[in-house]
Structure formats: structure tokens, C-alpha cells
Amino acid sequence: MSTGVIIALIVVGVVVVVAAGVFAARTKPRGGRSLKSRFGPEYERVVARHNGDTKAAEHELTERVRRHGSLRTRELDPAARERYRARWAAAQERFVESPSEAVAEAEALIADLAKERGFPDAGRYDEQVEALSVHHAHHVHGYRRVHEAAHTGIGAGTEELREAMVEARALFDDLTGAGGGVAHRDRTDETAADSAHTRHNRTSGSPLKGRLAKGS
């Protein structure tokens, strides 16, 4: 083997090592303040679950990043994005007649959407939520709420179910992507909310509390 080939191999090796180091530095958390900034409300939930033990909570979050930080999501094509938005609008309409069924549909919809984007499938719910928390930390709790309501439904009144759907909508928007479709999304949501409001007034004579689409 010639000297030139050996030098070339050494250079390639050095480049690979440096690139790996840069990637590791970008994906590895750098301590409590970094984790708190990255995870936001999820950081506080994990600390609370560990009874205020920040060291244990940060160890758990660091492990989540180690396992899922390098995950590369897949983009939705326009047809898939519209299909999911149509399903969400249908779930909003169903909420007036059957809140529990609407919440169950919202939970299944987000599970399907997350899988299509490249996250673990819903058959591995805990792993799916962990991965989502790494990439969508500020909104993942809404998915937990509709999941819990869909699978237990114990003690959940209509208002609690509405709030769960509103919170889950933020994650849905993250996963479908707002770019290029905001105007269409807003018009669809307004139509669904107004229709639900009208139908509820006709059947009960009282206004629908809040708006499912935007939580306002």
C-alpha cells in the first residue's frame, strides 16, 4: 500500500471521528439548565414524578435523549396531511354527540400520525411517548391526556375531555406541520367549531364551552 493511500485513509478516519464527536455533542444534554430549557414543562413533570429529585429526573431525561435524540422524522406528503386534518375535524364534530368517542379518535389519530412521521408505533406506547417528548416536549402531555381518557375514562367529565382534546391539538399541529397550511387549517377549525356550536344549541339550548380547535 502506497504512502499516499495510507495518508488518505488516515485523513478519512480523522474526519469520521471529528464528525462523530460533533454529532454526539449536539445530541447529548449538557446539564440541568440545558435539559430544563429543552424539555420545558416535561422537565417539571418528570421532576415531580421523582418527588423533586432533580438528579434522578435529569438522568431519566438524559437517557431519553440518548435513545431518541438521533431519530430522524419523515415528512408528510400533502395528501396525508389533509387526510389527518379531515380526521381531526370529524373528531371535533363527533365531540358534541359523543365526547368519549371523539377523544378516543383523537388519541388513535395522533398515534397513527406519530408512527407515519417515524416515531415508534402505538403498540410501544411508552417508547412512543418518550420519543415524542424528546422532539415535541412542550406538547406531548396532550397526547397522554387523550390516551388516559380513551383507555380509562374514569371520572372524566365533558369539560375535562374537551380540555384534553384542546391540549392534544397542539401536538397534532406540530406533527402535521403548520407551514403552508395555516389558513386552510384555521378555516377548517372555525367551520367545525361553529357547526358543533350550532348543533349543540339546537339540541340542548346552551352554548358549547370553549372551542375545541384552539382552546379559546
Image: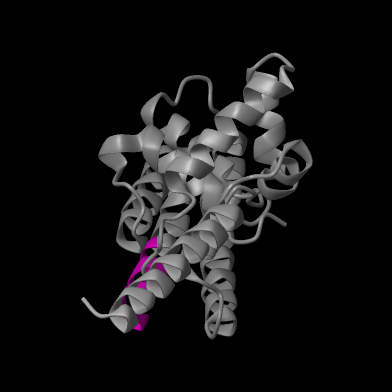
Specify the farthest residue to the left: 1
Coloring scheme used: one colour
| Quarter containing the N terminus | bottom left
Residue 165 visible somewhere in the drawing = no
Residue at the extreme top:
51
- Along the line of sight, the residue nearer the viewer: 149 or 33: 33
> Could you tell me which residue is drawn at 53 percent across and 27 percent down?
156
Question: Eyeballing the image, is 35 above or below 212?
Answer: above
Q: Is residue 2 magenta?
A: no
Above or below, 4 relative to 50: below
Q: Position of residue 96 (x, y in %)?
A: 48, 49
Please count the marks in the image: 0
Q: Residue at x 53, y 76 (%)?
A: 185
Quadrant where the C terminus is found in the figure: bottom right
Q: Which residues are magenta?
A: 75-87
Would you say residue 89 is visible in this rendering?
Answer: yes
Q: Is residue 156 left or right of residue 3?
A: right
Q: Quadrant of residue 45?
A: top right
The reply, left or right, for residue 160 in relation to residue 37 is: left
Q: Main secondary structure of the magenta part?
A: helix
* Front residue of 172 and 136: 136
The residue sitting at 36% across, 79% down in the picture is 8
Q: Residue at x 40, y 63 (%)?
A: 73
Up-down: is 39 above or below 197? above
- Is residue 79 found inside the magenta-colored segment of the image? yes
How far across and down, in percent of the image, does residue 3 sit? 32, 79
Front in this rendered view, residue 157 or 76: 76
Q: Position of residue 108 (x, y in %)?
A: 34, 47
User: In the rendered image, which quarter is residue 56 located in?
Assistant: top right
User: What x and y, as percent, mark residue 208?
Assistant: 63, 51
